[in-house]
């Protein structure tokens, strides 16, 4: 089995007041291991909802979701939380880091939840922060880091435990183009070197250009799916 | 592993507390203030109760009394403790007893040249009485009784005023003896006592015990064996020992041992009432503080809903988040409690050595001869009971918003405004 993500006929509707708003409409999608995929579309096209469904943060109304062979609909909430902890890394647009912890402690936190011993946690956290270009900034708290550096810490935290897939929801949205490009270069490198699958949601042209595969959404449906 | 996890949890909690310094300082201050008040007030209450009890027992009843069964209720002349020397012998062997004395009482008509009054005349052993009660120190005019005195009497100042007598004046006593005969004698006023307690000063008349026994045909019998303990805490143990001793001597059938709570139930009721009203006040104080803390915790969780969403998204279970929030709120509470205990104890220790002037005190306090200066008494109970109640109620207040985290869903939390 070469697919890390398999979505079949996913439907999701939100209730806004008394009106049903369809967010995802009958979407089927497979993503291969080691992919660098962008899910693009305008605001309200359903890309964040789709990413949340892949990440087990949101449940579809119908359809099946499989990530790394695990079928979500059969999982209890605590098993789903465990799956997110061990197999899925997240990078969000904002509010990514725990503000009271340093960069190294933020990276350590996920490993702590996984039960990794202190020594190994520290070694891995420092190594991954070195990899994302934050050597010497281990003890800085988020407020002492730039937006780009914070996103790098988030990437470091997402990949430090070698997850099956990293989901990034508009990771460059709050960054200037130069910093955004730097972050994308970093993720591309991690994708190549560590064989981590990356899936982005974005409406940033630069991110789309970096993607190895571009899935376009409009009104909750895929209208274009191109591999480069 | 567990200790390492707890270490990071505590570190996170501690740093979270100081994210909003002003709010945390205010909350800690509220907890500290509540604990400080609780420590001081409880120490003051418990300290003043001991003062009240000791003042009252030293004035009249003693900590314990041995009486004939039924005497306490009926005050009948015939209900006597015969051979009191034997009881004294038993008391000598019991550790913890500070002193004891014998008393006999008789309701009599006392007349001066100008007036007559109904009075409880008490026969006392002057030497022993001075060890048990504080009456000797209250003589305002004339002198206290001596062992060799016979037909001499000490009179309360209000009674003396009412009878219009002064030291050296003569009084006639007319009553009924133990055998039913008429008891009559003339006595000379030797001293006048002023206790400051109107009821006591209006009714007290004391004559030497031997003279009393002769006038009232008592033989060697008395009505009360009055005992003071070295410490209030030892009273119940001494009571049991006396009862055992009396039983062993074969005197158990006719005699009873009464402690100060049975002898002056009004004092115990007053203390209980004061304690209950104090507890209500403390409870209100703790509840007010708990609401302020609840508000802080609710705000703190509300402000960080997005952060909680992110933490849940990366795999933190709701249980762990609840644990984190509870560690945070309890750390905040503990800082306030520790500061409160320290400040409250220091204030209490200061007043424990300097006392608090209560000269404008209420009638209730006057009634029991409580001195004008009261001293709080710091103990483990007074220092810890109040703060422990604050801790429990604060924990419950913190539990409510913390448990609310369980209902959070990562996506909704992350989009929380």
Image: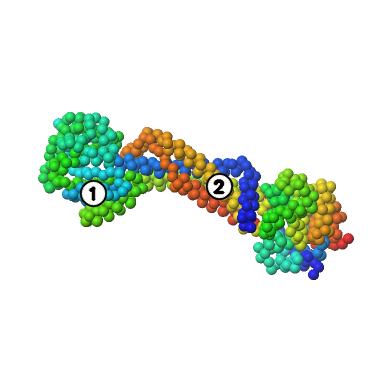
Q: Is residue B355 above or below residue A127?
A: above
Locate residue B52, reporting x and y percent. 35, 41
Q: Nearer the viewer, residue A15 or A96?
A: A96
Front position among marks 2 and 1: 1
Residue B89: give its label.
1
Locate residue A64, reporting x and y percent. 74, 67
Label 1, secondary structure: give it: helix
Q: Nearer the viewer, residue B5 or B168?
A: B5
At horizontal 30% and vertical 34% (from top left) the residue drawn is: B196
Marks 2 and 1: same chain? yes
| Left or right: residue B326 compared with residue B374 | right
Residue designated by label 2:
B333
Label 2, secondary structure: give it: helix
Q: Dot 1 falls on which chain?
A: B
Mark 2–mark 1 distance (CA, rounded to whole Å): 57 Å
User: Image quadrant of residue B413?
Assistant: bottom right
């Amino acid at each position: 089995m070469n697919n890390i993500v398999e979505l079949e006929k996913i439907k999701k509707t939100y209730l806004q007041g008394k009106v049903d708003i369809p967010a995802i409409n009958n979407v089927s999608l497979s993503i291969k291991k080691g992919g660098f995929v962008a899910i693009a579309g305008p605001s309200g096209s359903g890309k964040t909802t789709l990413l949340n469904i892949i990440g087990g943060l949101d449940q579809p109304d119908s359809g099946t979701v499989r990530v790394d062979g695990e079928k979500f609909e059969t999982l209890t909430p605590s098993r789903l939380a465990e799956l997110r902890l061990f197999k899925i890394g997240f990078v969000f647009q904002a509010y990514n880091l725990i503000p009271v912890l340093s960069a190294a402690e933020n990276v350590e936190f996920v490993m702590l939840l996984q039960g990794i011993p202190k020594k190994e946690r520290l070694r891995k956290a420092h190594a991954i922060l070195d990899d994302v270009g934050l050597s010497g900034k281990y003890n800085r708290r988020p407020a002492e880091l730039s937006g780009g550096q914070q996103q790098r810490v988030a990437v470091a935290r997402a990949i430090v435990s070698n997850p099956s897939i990293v989901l990034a929801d508009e990771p460059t949205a709050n960054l200037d183009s130069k910093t955004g490009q730097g972050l994308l270069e970093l993720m591309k490198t991690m994708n190549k070197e560590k064989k981590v699958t990356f899936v982005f949601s974005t409406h940033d042209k630069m991110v789309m250009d970096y993607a190895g595969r571009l899935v376009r959404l409009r009104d909750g449906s895929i209208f274009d799916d191109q591999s480069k | 592993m567990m200790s390492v996890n707890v270490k990071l949890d505590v570190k996170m909690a501690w740093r979270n507390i100081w994210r909003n310094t002003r709010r945390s300082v205010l909350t800690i201050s509220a907890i500290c203030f509540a604990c400080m008040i609780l420590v001081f007030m409880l120490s003051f209450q418990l300290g003043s109760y001991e003062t009240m009890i000791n003042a009252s027992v030293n004035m009249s009843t003693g900590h314990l009394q041995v009486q004939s069964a039924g005497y306490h209720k009926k005050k009948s002349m015939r209900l006597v403790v015969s051979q009191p020397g034997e009881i004294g012998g038993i008391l000598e062997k019991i550790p913890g007893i500070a002193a004891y004395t014998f008393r006999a009482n008789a309701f009599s008509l006392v007349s001066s040249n100008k007036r007559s009054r109904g009075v409880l005349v008490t026969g006392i052993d002057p030497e022993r009485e001075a060890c048990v009660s504080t009456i000797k120190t209250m003589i305002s005019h004339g002198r206290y009784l001596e062992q060799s005195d016979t037909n001499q009497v000490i009179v309360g100042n209000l009674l003396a005023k009412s009878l219009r007598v002064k030291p050296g004046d003569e009084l006639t006593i007319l009553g009924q003896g133990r055998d039913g005969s008429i008891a009559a004698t003339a006595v000379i006023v030797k001293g006048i006592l002023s206790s400051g307690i109107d009821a006591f000063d209006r009714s007290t008349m004391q004559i030497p015990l031997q003279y009393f026994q002769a006038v009232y045909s008592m033989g060697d019998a008395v009505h009360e064996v009055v005992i003071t303990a070295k410490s209030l805490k030892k009273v119940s143990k001494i009571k049991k020992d006396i009862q055992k001793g009396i039983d062993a001597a074969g005197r158990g059938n006719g005699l009873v041992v009464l402690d100060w709570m049975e002898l002056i139930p009004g004092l115990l009721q007053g203390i209980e009432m004061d304690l209950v009203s104090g507890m209500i006040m403390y409870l209100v104080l703790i509840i007010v503080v708990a609401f302020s803390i609840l508000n802080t915790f609710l705000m703190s969780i509300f402000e960080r809903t997005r952060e909680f969403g992110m933490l849940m998204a990366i795999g933190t279970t709701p249980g762990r988040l609840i644990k984190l929030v509870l560690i945070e709120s309890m750390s905040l509470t503990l800082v306030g409690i520790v500061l409160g205990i320290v400040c409250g104890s220091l204030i209490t220790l200061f007043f424990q050595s300097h006392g608090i002037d209560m000269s404008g005190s209420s009638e209730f306090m006057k009634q029991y001869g409580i001195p004008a200066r009261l001293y709080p008494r710091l103990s483990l109970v007074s220092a810890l009971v109040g703060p422990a109640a604050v801790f429990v109620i604060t924990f419950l207040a913190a539990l409510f918003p913390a448990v609310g985290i369980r209902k959070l869903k990562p996506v909704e939390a992350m989009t929380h405004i």
